[in-house]
Image (cartoon, grey):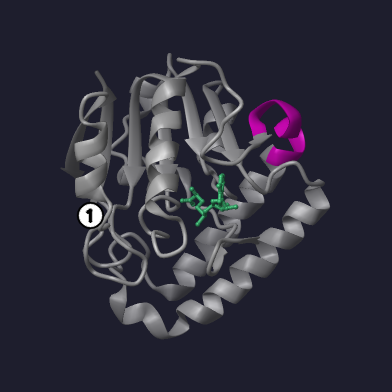
Amino acid sequence: MHKGKNGKIWFLGRSYQEYVKMFSLKEEELRDIRILDCAAGASSFTPHLLKKGYDSTAVDILYGKSVEETKQQCVNDFHTLMKMHAGLTHKVDWSFFQDPEDMVQQRISVYEEFLDSYAQYKDERYIKAALPELPFGDNSFDLVLSSHLLFIYEDRLGYDFHRDSILEMLRITSSEVRIYPILKLHGESESSFLPSLMDELGDKADFNMEKVDYQFRRGSDEMLKINKK
Ligand SMILES: C[S@@+](CC[C@H](N)C(=O)[O-])C[C@H]1O[C@@H](n2cnc3c(N)ncnc32)[C@H](O)[C@@H]1O
């Protein structure tokens, strides 16, 4: 796990199906575009798309390790996190998963799918890099997705990190960046950085919040769409 300034940011992974809902995606619209998932962790989003022959790349600060080390990291972080979450089930919306046990089983399948794909495409599609600096040229992708890194960890990743990360993702996309969720980790409220970010970056991009058909933590049913001007 990566230690943020005041705590840990877990190497976790959500499924392709969760990404589709978190970001209101339609698979057919992804077919002919270049997609980047940043920071992707042990998600099965890119693995699923690579299996289908789509052009998806994943970035994470913790990539670059051997498959065995990465597997250990998935297992350790997953089990620690599940223990921490045990008392929080009342804060969770159980419409996506049937119940806590279903969630555990699905999340294990997700990191197993990720590990298979990581073993196969480690050097081409799973790139070790750290926001706010990404090793890609301008307009290298058409859609950049970022799930569960920005905004929720605003207690340990400061305003400048958020601004510079959004600017960097805008630099490498030809068109759009989507971020989910926009809630703080332990709060029910939106990130306190959002209004200032929209104000400061408003001449470079259009910011729109959109309702999505997904929420795990109750109240987190909005994503942020950022379109380059
Ligand atoms: C909570 S996980 C989210 C993973 C995935 N996007 C999802 O929603 O399932 C956050 C990920 O961010 C990665 N990370 C933390 N700081 C980062 C940085 N500065 N640049 C890139 N990745 C980072 C962590 O290693 C971790 O895998």
* Residue shown at 80% from the left, 55% from the top: 69
Task: Tell me if residue 165 can be seen.
Answer: yes
Percent coordinates x, y for residue 17 in the rendering: 41, 45
Where residue 78 sits, quadrant-wise, is: bottom right
> Does residue 150 appear left or right of residue 118 in this picture?
left
Mark 1 Cα shell of 10 Å, populated few (<14), some (14-19), many (≥20): many
Picture quarter with the C terminus? top left
Which residue is at the front of the view, 9 or 13? Answer: 9
> Does residue 195 appear left or right of residue 174 in this picture?
left
Task: Tell me if residue 212 can be seen.
Answer: no
Percent coordinates x, y for residue 49 in the rendering: 52, 30
Which residue corresponds to mark 1?
221
Which residue is at the front of the view, 51 or 145? Answer: 145
Where residue 143 sits, quadrant-wise, is: top left
126 vs 160: above or below? above
Q: Amino acid at mark 1?
A: Asp
> Does residue 98 appear left or right of residue 70 in this picture?
left
206 vs 117: above or below? above
Ligand 1 near label 1 (Cβ, under 8 Å)? no
Please give the range of residues in magenta.
118-126
Percent coordinates x, y for residue 161 in the rendering: 45, 46
* Residue shown at 40% from the left, 50% from the top: 150
174 vs 84: above or below? above
